[in-house]
Amino acid sequence: MTKYTIAPKDFKAFDVDGLEHRMEALNELVRPQLHNLGSYFADYFTSQTGEDFYPHVAKHARRSITPLLIRG
């Protein structure tokens, strides 16, 4: 894994069978690189604009129940 490059091999995480195992692969292979990119761009945009930027990598939220439909 390079600091700022997502390589073709990293996309193999999407080929992993089973959601739990796939999420583990994504967290191991892709997420650290997204954090690195976020930090890099936050620093860059802060230096260019004088405004503070904060990196954020969203997490997949799994529901344990199906939400009720809201009827209006």
Image (cartoon, rainbow, N blue to C red):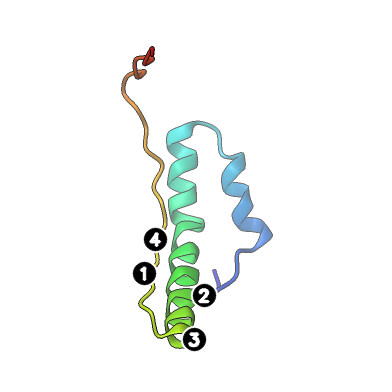
Name the mark nearer the viewer: 2 or 4. Answer: 4
Seen in the picture, residue 70 relative to 22 is either above or below; the reply is above
Q: Percent from the top left, x then y, of residue 28?
A: 44, 55
Q: Cα distance, mark 2 to mark 1?
A: 18 Å
Sequence order check, earlier mark of 3 and 2: 2
Question: Which residue is drawn at the image coordinates 56% and 39% (left, top)?
Answer: 16
Q: Cα distance, mark 4 to mark 1?
A: 7 Å
Toward the right, the furthest residue is: 8
In terms of depth relative to the viewer, which is nearer, 62 or 10?
62
Q: Residue 54 carries which label?
A: 1
Residue topped by disc 3? 48
Q: Cα distance, mark 3 to mark 2?
A: 22 Å
Q: Percent from the top left, x then y, of residue 8?
A: 68, 58
45 sits left or right of 66 in the view = right
Residue type, numbered disc 2:
Lys
Sequence order check, earlier mark of 2 and 1: 2
Q: Cα distance, mark 4 to mark 3?
A: 19 Å
Residue topped by disc 4? 56
Seen in the picture, residue 25 relative to 16 is either above or below; the reply is below
Give the secondary structure at mark 1.
loop
Q: Which mark is residue 3?
A: 2
Residue type, numbered disc 1:
Tyr
Residue type, numbered disc 3:
Gln
Residue type, numbered disc 4:
His
In terms of depth relative to the viewer, which is nearer, 40 or 44?
44
